[in-house]
Image: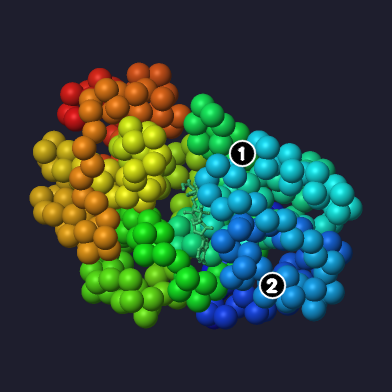
């Protein structure tokens, strides 16, 4: 088993990574929830038939009283209506402040269940069991929880750290290729922003099965990077913005195609390639960086370019909640493994584009 601790004063927690650990769900949850009677297990309609019973039985066998709440799979479930349903389910189940919510699923389940845990009874314990690659390397770590509004994604949320993150890499075997690739964009991002050796390792792995041969190491490396960033900037006021490498332009692609044509990872992939190109054009980025990112993203089935009008860029940059006023911080790369955040005028960025 690989274990990693996220050190946050008074709120530190472990990330446990091991093939088959889903079978130990009850034992591992009991370790961090000694006083808990009831667990509301939140999952989605794809994950429930695959892993729901196993998790529920393991929790029940360790003495928890469990109720499973299943949402329809997909982003539309990360909404206020499902949040209200979840709150009501928790109340009808008799949840108290020492009871807990366990999220079993991808980022949608984790974000929704985490926000419910952050808000119900002014906050109850919460455990993440991420089952997508994206959720294992990104959304389950760091405590950002949220729901979407019609006006945009993740607009209502909180910072609410889990008590434990349990990662079973075996759950990734049932992911469709497109969902696996989606997560690979974030995996590649960590190599770009923090660890050039890790980038090389991903080059060597070459494809999905190569990554799965070294999956525990891959997950550990990504989570260790995210943990280091979150430990220094939990509330996202500085360093944490480097995790948005490729995301501002990625956001433009997702929005331009109404979140239908390209997945988040596909959009981030094209965004990373373009920022690297712009960085090279401005002599900020070591030549050859863009080509290396293009080769690696393409190897994992991700697009290196997405057509987008200036109007779409303008709208995405204007509305980006990470920007302030007329300025925006763009995360460039100095070289693979090293970022170069640059505050620039939004008009200057649009001129570059
Ligand atoms: P998702 O939760 O919708 O999962 C993708 C699909 O895979 C779904 O259809 C799901 O049912 C299915 N699935 C999940 N696990 C499976 C498995 N093991 N086998 C087969 N199918 C499985 O999407 P996601 O990509 O995991 O997460 C995206 C969400 O995460 C977005 O809402 C995004 O905003 C959020 N996010 C949050 C953070 C954060 O820091 N909180 C970071 C990044 C992304
Ligand atoms: N996914 C970006 C963050 O957690 O800050």
Residue at 33% x, 71% y is: 208
Location of residue 22 in the rendering, given as x and y in whole percent from the top left corner? 62, 75
- In the structure shown, which secondary structural element does the residue marked by tag 1 occupy? loop
Location of residue 196 in the rendering, given as x and y in whole percent from the top left corner? 26, 62
Q: Is residue 228 visible?
A: no
Residue at 69% x, 72% y is: 53
Location of residue 323 in the rendering, given as x and y in whole percent from the top left corner? 40, 28
Residue 47 located left or right of residue 242: right
Residue 34 located left or right of residue 303: right
Q: Is residue 98 visible?
A: yes
Q: Earlier in the sequence, mark 2 or mark 1?
A: 2
- In the structure shown, which secondary structural element does the residue marked by tag 2 occupy? helix
Tag shown at residue 53? 2
Q: From the viewer's side, name the closer residue of 337 and 288.
A: 288
Residue 341 located left or right of residue 320: left
Identify the residue under disc 1: 79
293 versus 272 height, above or below:
below
Chosen colour scheme: rainbow
119 versus 113 height, above or below:
above
Q: If the image is split into quadrants, where does the C terminus sit?
A: top left
Cβ atoms under marks 2 and 1 closer than 8 Å: no
Residue at 34% x, 45% y is: 262
Q: If the image is split into quadrants, where does the N terminus sit?
A: bottom right
Location of residue 75 in the rendering, given as x and y in whole percent from the top left corner? 52, 45
């Amino acid at each position: 088993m690989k274990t990693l601790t996220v050190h946050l004063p008074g709120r530190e927690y472990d990330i446990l990574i091991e093939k088959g650990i889903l079978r130990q769900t009850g034992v591992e949850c009991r370790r961090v929830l000694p006083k808990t009677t009831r667990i509301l297990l939140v999952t989605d309609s794809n994950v429930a038939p695959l892993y729901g019973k196993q998790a529920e039985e393991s929790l029940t066998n360790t003495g928890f009283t469990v109720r499973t709440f299943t949402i329809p799979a997909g982003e539309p479930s990360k909404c206020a209506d499902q949040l209200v349903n979840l709150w009501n389910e928790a109340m009808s189940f008799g949840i108290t402040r020492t009871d807990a919510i366990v999220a079993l699923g991808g980022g949608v389940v984790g974000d929704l269940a985490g926000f419910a845990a952050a808000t119900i009874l002014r906050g109850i314990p919460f455990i993440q069991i991420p089952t997508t690659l994206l959720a294992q390397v990104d959304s389950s770590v760091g405590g950002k929880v949220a729901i979407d509004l019609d006006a945009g994604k993740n607009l209502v949320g909180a910072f609410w750290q889990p008590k434990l993150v349990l990662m079973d890499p075996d759950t990734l075997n049932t992911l469709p290729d497109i969902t696996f690739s989606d997560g690979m964009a974030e995996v590649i991002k960590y190599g770009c922003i923090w660890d050039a050796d890790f980038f090389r390792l991903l080059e060597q792995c070459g494809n999905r099965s190569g990554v799965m041969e070294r999956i525990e190491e891959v997950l550990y490396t990504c989570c260790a990077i995210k943990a280091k960033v979150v430990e220094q900037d939990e509330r996202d006021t500085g360093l944490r913005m480097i995790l948005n490498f490729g995301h501002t332009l990625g956001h433009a692609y997702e929005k331009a195609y109404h979140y239908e044509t390209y997945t988040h990872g596909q959009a981030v992939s094209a965004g990373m390639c373009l920022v690297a190109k712009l960085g090279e054009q401005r002599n900020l980025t070591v030549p050859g960086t863009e080509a290396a990112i293009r080769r690696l993203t393409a190897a994992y089935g991700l697009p290196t370019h997405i057509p987008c009008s200036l109007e779409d860029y303008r709208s995405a940059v204007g509305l980006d909640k990470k920007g302030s006023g007329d300025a925006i911080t763009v995360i460039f790369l100095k070289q693979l493994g090293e970022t170069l955040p640059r505050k620039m005028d939004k008009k200057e960025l649009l001129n570059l584009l």
